[in-house]
Image (spheres, helix red, strand yellow):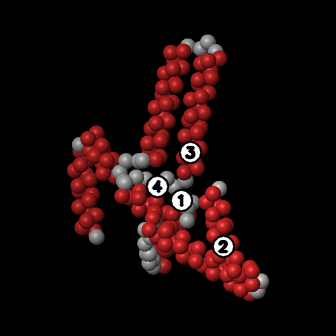
Amino acid sequence: MAKRSKRYADFYQFLTPYLEKGNPAEIVWAKKEYRRLYKAAWRRVHRKENKTFTVGWTKEELGILTVASKKHKVKPTRFIKQATLAYINKRYIVPNQQEVNKILQLVAMTYNAIETIIQESEIDITSIRKTEEEILQLEHEIRVVLLSPKTIEQILELEIQKHPDTKEYLTQFLEKVKNDN
């Protein structure tokens, strides 16, 4: 609250000489001038704390960016920042975070429903506990798959470990693609 009062005090201190003169045109000019000076000071502080980059886009690139940002339901600038950080951290950008949260909430509600059944009834506790543990494991797996899926390299390594003959097939396939391009 003190910050807010100080800001208004600064404003009225700035305007006082113009208010005393009573000239409406000067008062309007003084308000605009105060706003201009305030914004300039804010920008100066903001630039010290935050680095900004200016990026140029062709029409085609802008179209691709716009489609992707709409798919993820965020503005292009926010999408650029999310995508950049996700790429650096080798993370996945969830296209619709609300839907993912809804799925996780439903799994958690299922878990809670089982907890309630256990407390209210006399069903075989062992089988219910086993089901409960499976649901917790499922929630964990869903969370991992949706929020940080494996990279293509990790998927290929796992596939080759499971089926060693896949390595030869992939090598041939990549050679074919390389030769076609």
User: Callout 3: helix, strand or loop?
Assistant: helix
Which numbered disc, 3 or 4, marks the residue that appears first in the sequence?
4
- Whether residues under marks 2 and 1 lie with C-beta atoms below 8 angstroms apart, the answer is no
**Residue at (46% x, 47% y) in the render:** 147
For the residues carrying marks 2 and 4, which lies nearer the camera in this image? 2
Q: Is residue 96 above or below residue 132?
A: below
For residue 101, the mark is: 3
Which numbered disc, 3 or 2, marks the residue that appears first in the sequence?
2
Q: Is residue 71 above or below residue 120?
A: below
* Any part of residue 21 in sight: yes
For the residues carrying marks 2 and 1, which lies nearer the camera in this image? 2
Q: Amino acid at mark 4?
A: Ile
Q: Amino acid at mark 3?
A: Asn
Residue 159 rendering spot, x and y as whole percentages: 30, 44
- Whether residues under marks 3 and 2 lie with C-beta atoms below 8 angstroms apart, the answer is no
Q: Dividing the picture into quarters, in which one does residue 125 lie?
A: top right
Label 3, residues with CA under 10 Å away: few <14, some 14-19, many ≥20: few
Q: Amino acid at mark 2?
A: Gln
For residue 13, the mark is: 2
Q: Amino acid at mark 1?
A: His
Residue 157 rendering spot, x and y as whole percentages: 28, 46
For residue 93, the mark is: 4
**Would you say 36 lies left or right of 79 here?**
right
Tell me how far mark 2 sits from mark 4, CA to CA: 49 Å
For the residues carrying marks 3 and 2, which lies nearer the camera in this image? 2
Q: Dividing the picture into quarters, in which one does residue 178 lie?
A: bottom left
Residue 10 rendering spot, x and y as whole percentages: 63, 70
Residue named by callout 1 = 72
